[in-house]
Image (cartoon, rainbow, N blue to C red):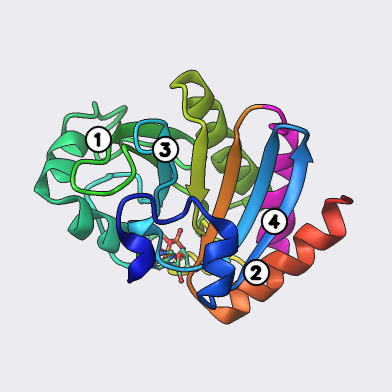
């Protein structure tokens, strides 16, 4: 990929020319929301102030979906860093709705923010848990000086959250942090999810 050399996601117009689907929305004069299709494991804008969000489970030792892909791409150092995160109770390093931060190791992004979204059919209040999950990631990112952050569609794979509802929650929470990041990206794995997220952004952000 010609765009994956050193700063693969810097130039939105170059990506558009390369055929990547992408949408850009202004959150404030100094902050944008970028919605694109792609693989979050290759995402980076700025190196040292980048974070990708890992949709993990409470044990934080890897799994399937994006979590598995992120651990494979980051290398075994990420597993070790996760093991070093203290358990808050047996088998739980990151309770649902919370977030933890580690390095990115072999990933292009310098940081990984691990969060646990709700299992849609098992959570009593999935909307609250998903909101908390996005809020926890953005709060922790801010505390750590992150300027560029990329989210996948948390809970929309193995955890079966309905896409439209998830996208409204995701974008509403991003709007609460309008001044806090240079760019917030959604890096979405399929056409369907990309389409739903783009529609919700157009409905919820009026540029
Ligand atoms: N880049 C971007 N998005 C991806 C990628 C990727 N490389 N791979 C998958 N997705 P999921 P969840 C999309 O299942 O629902 C794991 O086993 C995927 O298409 O990764 O929060 C964890 O250990 C979907 O749209 O996360 C947990 O046990 C979205 O990422 C559980 O799955 C999220 O799907 C978490 O389930």
Q: Kindly report which numbered mark, 4 or 2, lies closer to the viewer in this rendering.
A: 4
Q: Earlier in the sequence, mark 3 or mark 1?
A: 3
Label pair 4/3, CB-CB below 8 angstroms = no
Residue 17 image point, x, y percent: 56, 73
* Label 1 – label 2 distance at C-alpha: 32 Å
* Label 3 – label 1 distance at C-alpha: 31 Å
Label pair 3/1, CB-CB below 8 angstroms = no
Residue 168 image point, x, y percent: 74, 56
Q: Mark 3 sits on what residue? A: 50
Q: Mark 2 sits on what residue? A: 163
Q: Return the residue nearer the eye: 130 or 113.
A: 113
Q: Relative to residue 100, is residue 124 depicted above or below? A: below
Q: Residue at x 56, y 51 (%)?
A: 185
Q: Earlier in the sequence, mark 4 or mark 1?
A: 4
Residue 71 in sight from this viewpoint: yes
Q: Return the residue nearer the eye: 20 or 89.
A: 20
Q: Secondary structure at mark 1?
A: loop
Q: Kindly report which numbered mark, 2 or 3, lies closer to the viewer in this rendering.
A: 3
Q: Secondary structure at mark 2?
A: helix
Q: Earlier in the sequence, mark 1 or mark 2?
A: 1
Q: Relative to residue 134, is residue 67 depicted above or below? A: below
Q: Residue furthest right?
A: 206
Q: Mark 1 sits on what residue? A: 90
């Amino acid at each position: 990929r010609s765009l994956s050399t050193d700063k693969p996601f810097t130039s939105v117009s170059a990506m558009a020319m390369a055929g990547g689907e992408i949408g850009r929305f202004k959150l404030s004069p100094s902050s944008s929301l970028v919605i694109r299709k792609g693989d979050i494991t290759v995402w980076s804008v700025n190196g040292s102030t980048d974070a990708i969000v890992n949709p993990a489970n409470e044990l934080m030792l890897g799994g399937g979906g994006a979590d598995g892909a992120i651990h494979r791409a980051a290398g075994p150092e990420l597993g070790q860093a996760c093991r070093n995160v203290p358990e808050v109770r047996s088998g739980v390093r990151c309770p649902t709705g919370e977030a933890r931060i580690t390095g990115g190791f072999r990933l292009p992004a310098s940081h990984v923010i691990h969060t646990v979204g709700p299992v849609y059919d098992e959570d009593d209040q999935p909307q609250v848990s998903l909101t908390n999950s996005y809020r926890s990631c953005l709060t922790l990112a801010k505390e750590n000086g992150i300027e560029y952050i990329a989210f996948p569609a948390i809970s929309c794979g193995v955890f079966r959250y309905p896409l439209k509802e998830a996208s409204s929650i995701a974008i509403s929470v991003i709007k609460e942090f309008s001044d806090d990041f240079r760019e917030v990206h959604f890096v979405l794995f399929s056409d369907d999810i990309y389409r739903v997220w783009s529609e919700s952004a157009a409905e919820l952000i009026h540029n």
